Every structure is written in C-alpha cells, then in structure tokens.
Image (cartoon, rainbow, N blue to C red):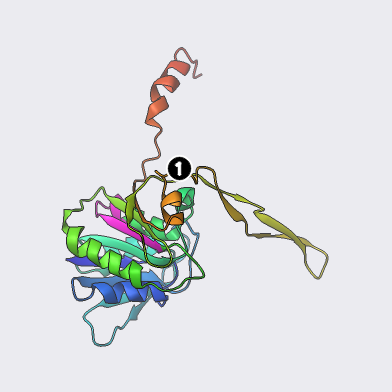
Amino acid sequence: MRILISNDDGINAKGITQLRKSLEEHAEIFVVAPDRERSATGHKITMHRPLRVKEQVYPGTNSKGWAVDGTPSDCVKLGLEALLPVLPDLVISGINLGPNLGTDVLYSGTVSAAIEGIINNIPAIAISLASYEYQDFTYSSKFIKNLVTGYGKELHGGILLNVNVPPGIPRGVKVTKLGNRRYTNVFFKRTDPRGGTYFWMAGEPFDVDGDNPDTDVWAVNEGYISITPIHYDLTNYRIIGDINNLIKGLDIL
C-alpha cells in the first residue's frame, strides 16, 4: 500500500512524525506537508505566487518527504500532481494536535488536506488528538495503524473518515455525525501602543448538541474515539423541491 501523509501543524510536528513511524513497516510512505504551522487555513490554495519545495530526508527509512511553503491543500494537490512517482492508495492527514469536531471541520487545514484526496477519488482519513494539553500520540498512532492495516484496502475513493481520539486511554470507538459547534467570546478588543484598535480572535467552544450521543463532540467528551464519515458535497438535497416551487414563474429578465 502507498500512503500520502500531510498535516497542517508542519512537517516537523510530533504528530505527523509519529504517524509516519507507525506506518512505515506496513506501507510505502510519502510525506508532503507544510514547512510551518498552517492551522485553520481551511481549503485555501496558493494561486498568486510560486510554491517552493524542499526535499525531506528520513534517515534509515525508505520514506520520501517534501516540505512545501504552502497550505495543506497545496501540499496534497502538489503531491498528487507533481511530486509522487505514482498515485497513492490512501491519503492521511494528521495526527493533528487539537480536535477537529463538529462544524470546525469547515475551517480545518487537517480535514481540508484529506478532502483534497477524495476530490481526486482517493480515500482519505483525517486524524486528530482531541486535546492541546495532552500531547501523547501513542493511542492515536496505534489506532490509525490498526485501522489502516486492518481495513485500509476496503476504503474506496469517495470515503473520508474524520477521526478524533480523546486524551488518555480510549473507552472504545463510536461512528458519529458532526456536532454543531459554536464559539463564545470570539474576539478580544485591544489597543496598540499608538492608540489604534485591534482584535484578537480566541473564543471558547459551545456545543449546541453536545449531549447528543450521535455526535462526535459527545463521543470524544465521553472518552470514545469518534469516526465521522464526511464529504465535500454541500448541497441541501432536502430543500431542492422547495426551491423549485419557490422560483416557478419567476421572471429572470
């Protein structure tokens, strides 16, 4: 199996390093990741300047790597279309430090890198350690290794699994849906030394349906690994008929 690994924490982050090491005995590994942290970049791509690439060496292994001065989505696109000698069987993004739960996936560089895989009809997994304080990737890397070696070949091009691993020893695994996550106290207003006003984005998560056992937020809060199948089709199929009825007879000129 050939696996393309990326992330949004940077190519030298602890999470991506442990992910690579956990899979090297089981797959041919290619790493294409940002040369620095690119968190919360969403699906941003670089169009108005060239992308610069530096080869990464992993002594004692057959893994190949490239650091890119672009976004996570840039990295996967570049890997698939220019850097890898052959297309991979799987794209994995992570292991991210911090959760990617609920509606946060819309902002996540980690998830966006994985989405680039399924856009190109390659199955993908985004994996996150759902904590900033607890930085032990042991259980996260063991779980992704077991998932890939056990079921990786059964995944097809339309599948993207968003995996969040709780801190500590997981109680089990839950297949979930995305929760509804919002933030309170998002902006802090400050004054600079010259008297100018600026705003610093922060905020605390508020989970609207955090007590719903079907959601990823609930599962992780209860100590379970959450697996959420997601896709990039944002079409609201439920109301297509309503919109058709709404515009009947609409004069377009």
- For the image, the number of numbered tags is 1
The extreme bottom residue here reads 60
Q: Which picture quadrant has residue 12?
A: bottom left
| Quadrant in the rendering for residue 196 | bottom right
On the question of residue 96 being in view, the answer is: yes
Residue at 36% in and 47% down: 176
Q: Position of residue 171 (x, y in %)?
A: 35, 59
Q: Residue at x 45, y 73 (%)?
A: 135
Compared across the picture, whether 58 is left or right of 246 comes to left
Is residue 7 at all visible to an observer of this figure? no
Q: Is residue 118 left or right of residue 166?
A: left
Check if residue 188 falls in the magenta segment: no
Residue named by callout 1: 212
Q: Residue at x 41, y 32 (%)?
A: 236
Q: Which quarter of the figure is the N terminus placed in?
A: bottom left
Report if residue 126 lies within the magenta region: yes
* Relative horizontal placement of residue 146, taking residue 238 as reference (left or right): left
Point out residue 126 in the picture as x, y percentages from the top left corner.
Answer: 35, 59
Residue 183 placement (x, y as % from top left): 59, 50
The boundaries of the magenta stretch are 117-128
- Of all residues shown, which one is farthest toward the right? 195
* Residue toward you, 145 or 201: 145
How many other residues sit within 10 Å of disc 1, few (<14), some (14-19) or many (≥20)? some
Up/down of 174 relative to 89, above or below = above
The amino acid type, in three-letter code, at marker 1 is Asn
Q: Residue at x 35, y 76 (%)?
A: 17
